[in-house]
């Protein structure tokens, strides 16, 4: 990789870290309710409270990661912890990629590795 290609790769990873808008998280929650068994019916107050917490927590992750986690196959409506675990796993993978590119770039600079 050239210096410019490495910088572009690092920038692409950085660009992916834009969070999903609250409205989009709510749409994905609604979609989950439609495609999964939700168990017992929740009151409107419960649904609004759950939605607020989900938006707050999932806004910490990049949009593509949240979308992928919320569109995964679930038989039952997932807990927030289940969705966040999927997000955390994707974030860990993304961080490994970022570190690999940076490490390769640093080593290539000093001439020790191509």
Image (cartoon, rainbow, N blue to C red):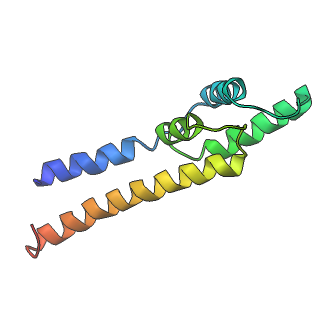
Q: Residue at x 28, y 63 (%)?
A: 100
Q: Which residue in the rendered view is the most extreme toward the front?
A: 75
Vertical side of 88 occupied by 69: above or below: above
Work out which quarter of the rendered image holds the C terminus and state it. bottom left
Q: Quadrant of residue 111?
A: bottom left
Whole-percent x and y of residue 43?
A: 92, 28
Name the image quarter holding the N terminus.
Answer: bottom left
Q: What x and y, as percent, mark residue 23?
A: 64, 25
Tell me the residue at 47%/51% (across/down). Answer: 90
Q: Residue at position x 19%, y 63% from top?
A: 105
Q: Which residue shows up at 80% across the image and 38% down it?
A: 50
Count of numbered tags:
0
Q: Is residue 108 above or below residue 76?
A: below
Q: Position of residue 45 (x, y in %)?
A: 90, 30
Question: Residue 15 at x, y = what percent?
Answer: 38, 41
**38 sits left or right of 19 in the view:** right
Quarter of image, res 21: top right
Q: Is residue 49 left or right of residue 100?
A: right
Instruction: Judge from the rendering whether residue 64 lies leftward or rightward of residue 104; answer left or right.
Output: right
Vertical comparison of 69 with 33: above or below: below
97 left or right, relative to 3:
right
């Amino acid at each position: 990789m050239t210096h410019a290609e490495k910088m572009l790769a690092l920038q692409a990873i950085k660009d992916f870290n834009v969070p999903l808008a609250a409205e989009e998280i709510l749409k994905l929650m609604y979609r989950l309710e439609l495609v999964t068994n939700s168990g017992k019916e929740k009151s409107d107050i419960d649904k609004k409270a759950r939605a607020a917490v989900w938006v707050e927590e999932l806004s910490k992750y990049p949009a593509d990661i949240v979308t992928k986690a919320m569109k995964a196959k679930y038989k039952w409506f997932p807990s927030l912890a289940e969705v966040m675990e999927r997000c955390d796993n994707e974030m860990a993978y993304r961080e490994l990629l970022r570190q690999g590119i940076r490490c390769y770039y640093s080593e290539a600079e000093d001439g020790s590795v191509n």
